[in-house]
Amino acid sequence: MPFNPTYSSVDTEGCDLHYWYQGSGPLLVLIPGGGGIGKQFNSLFEHLDEHFTVCAYDRRQSGLSTVQQRRLLNPAQHARDIIAITKDLGRQRTSIFSNSGGGIIAFQFAISYPEFLDHVIAHETPTTSLLEDSAHYLDKAMTLIDMFHNEGVMAASQAFFADMKGYEDSPPMPAPALEDIQNFWENEYLSFTTYCPNLSKIVENEVSIAVATGRKSGDAYYSVATVHQEKILRCPRFVFPGNHSGFDAEPTVFASHLLDALQKMEQKAPRLGWPQSKNADRFQEIRAVTFQVIIPAIVLYNVPRVLTYLGQITPVK
């Protein structure tokens, strides 16, 4: 159906976290990358909502998700933010689609809180430390930070975008608010470009995960990074339409590829049949109480009666 979500918010760890959702079925949370604004995914909703309860959100200290004091990005805390949304929706688990730096959060989620996950697809996560020329990208990251401090937001952003590929014939994306761009450079950029979670731990946790790249991204560093991620994670690597933000430029075909990828992952590792709705979760709670408390209590209550009855039986000689 056309984009017409329900808007909500949840207070968690000092943040008024704003999110919106639409559809029915298992939960699918979309994690934005740099800038942290969830509306970049809005055009996907109408193509996914028949299969999933689709949820987007403004990441902590971005957009409407305000905090009293801005801090350096903590991927583990951002993962817990998604858990807070998941629980606020009455769910126990979620699937995740992440883009760009949002993949750092998705990877950390899979390391620290795998019990909350069904499937994860990380689209063009910029794990530059995995690249063969990682020193070059580390040097460049520091150069861009110096440029931000010395020349300002716009100079650093223009230099950063110069490495993006496949945007020649794409419509311009809505620019984030200046405040969110400022927050990206002050608190997020280095975490997203210099921190690489322990991907081997994700394999150990047996998380159902895949990586993806854009067909138009070519040999961009964030696309090449997915090749290395694929090898370490021993997971599928999907090629989606478009560039680094193909979900916004080509939402219909992008959503089709995303659904196909999730279907293949589900066939390999069935997860989405697990209880997802509030009623299903409540049923499981009642079932657990019945088997763990009520039935044992009934048995214990009747044991003396059974023993007394057995004592009255005369053995057959």
Image (spheres, grey):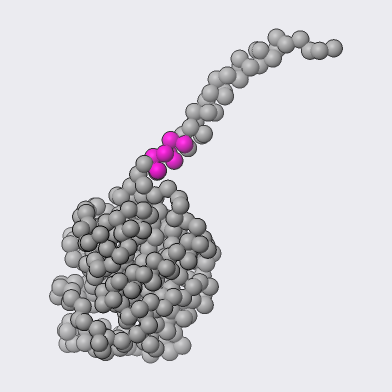
Q: Residue furthest front?
A: 1
Describe residue 43's horizontal placement relative to residue 253 as left or right. left
Quadrant into which the C terminus falls: top right
Picture residue at 36% right of the left edge, 47% below the top: 277
Describe residue 171's horizontal placement relative to residue 305 as left or right. left
**Can residue 12 be seen?**
yes
Q: Residue furthest left?
A: 178
Q: Is residue 136 above or below residue 278?
A: below
Percent x, y for residue 286?
A: 43, 35
Magenta stretch: helix, strand or loop mostly: helix
Quadrant into which the N terminus falls: bottom left
Quarter holding residue 184: bottom left
Picture residue at 44% right of the left edge, 41% below the top: 284
Picture residue at 31% right of the left edge, 87% below the top: 165
Percent x, y for residue 123?
A: 37, 74
Percent x, y for residue 163?
A: 30, 88
Picture residue at 69% right of the left edge, 14% below the top: 310
Instruction: Residue 177: say if magenta.
Output: no
Q: Is residue 161 above or below residue 24?
A: below
Q: How many marks?
A: 0
**Can residue 15 be seen?**
no
Percent x, y for residue 266?
A: 48, 61
Describe residue 294's horizontal placement relative to residue 16 as left or right. right
- Magenta span: 280-287
Instruction: Residue 286: say if magenta.
Output: yes
Quarter holding residue 113: bottom left
Q: Residue furthest right?
A: 317
Closer to the camera, 106 or 66?
A: 106
